[in-house]
Image: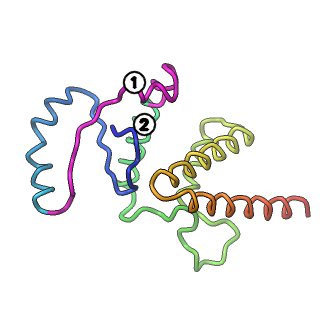
Amino acid sequence: MPLTHGTFDDVWLTVAGDIDAVVDSESGTWDDLVEDGLVTEWDVTDVTDEWYGNAGEQGGALKLRLHRVANRATGAAFEEFDERPAAVDAFPGEATEYPVGWWTLLHVIAGHQGYSPEETLAMFLRGTRETCEDAVEVGSSDEAVQRIDECIESLETLRADVES
């Protein structure tokens, strides 16, 4: 499991079991994908001390478990959708006050898990922070600052809507 994102075109495969046996069994297929030009390369990485170093021992263990849940959710999404839904508004041409997109899933899961509005907001704000930091990692700090400015503008619009 990679510790850095590199680009957003990466595919991560998490193996819960005998990694060496899986690599021995599947490496020929992965080599064929490289030979056919479908992927540029494949690599095996492991969860390292860095994984736990940034989240702590308990946080690192929870992070690994959350990735496993995310992997199952991603598999379910591939089964459910021929094309992934848009992040925010899957049907922008439809006149609606409630744009439905992938964000809806995250919001609904938070509700189903019993998170309060305050906890849900804290979750999304932390996710926003992580995403901006990822933008710096794969792009530039100027792009991240632009995204932050867009978030501030959106929040200021929301404040005006709530206050009126």
**Placement of the C terminus among the 4 image quadrants:** bottom right
Tell me if residue 35 is in the magenta stretch: no
Name the image quarter holding residue 14. Answer: top left
Percent position (x, y) of residue 118?
74, 40
Residue lying farthest to the top in this orientation: 57
Percent position (x, y) of residue 149?
69, 61
- Residue 99 marker: none
Q: For this view, does 120 lie left or right of residue 160?
A: left
Residue at the (35%, 47%) spot, across then down: 75
Which one is nearer the viewer's eye here, 21 or 151?
Answer: 151
Query: What residue is shown with label 2?
Result: 67
Q: Which segment did they paint magenta?
A: 37-63
Query: What residue is shown with label 1?
Result: 49
Percent position (x, y) of residue 20?
16, 29
Q: Few, some or many C-alpha atoms within 10 Å of disc 1 (few <14, some 14-19, many ≥20)?
A: few
Residue at the (11%, 49%) spot, across then down: 29
> At numbered mark 1, what does the secondary structure look like: helix, strand or loop?
helix
Q: Is residue 96 above or below residue 112?
A: below
Residue at the (73%, 42%) spot, across then down: 117
Q: CA distance from mark 2 to mark 1?
A: 17 Å
Percent position (x, y) of residue 107?
61, 49
**Placement of the N terminus among the 4 image quadrants:** top left
**Amino acid type of the residue that numbered disc 1 sits on in the rendered structure:** Asp
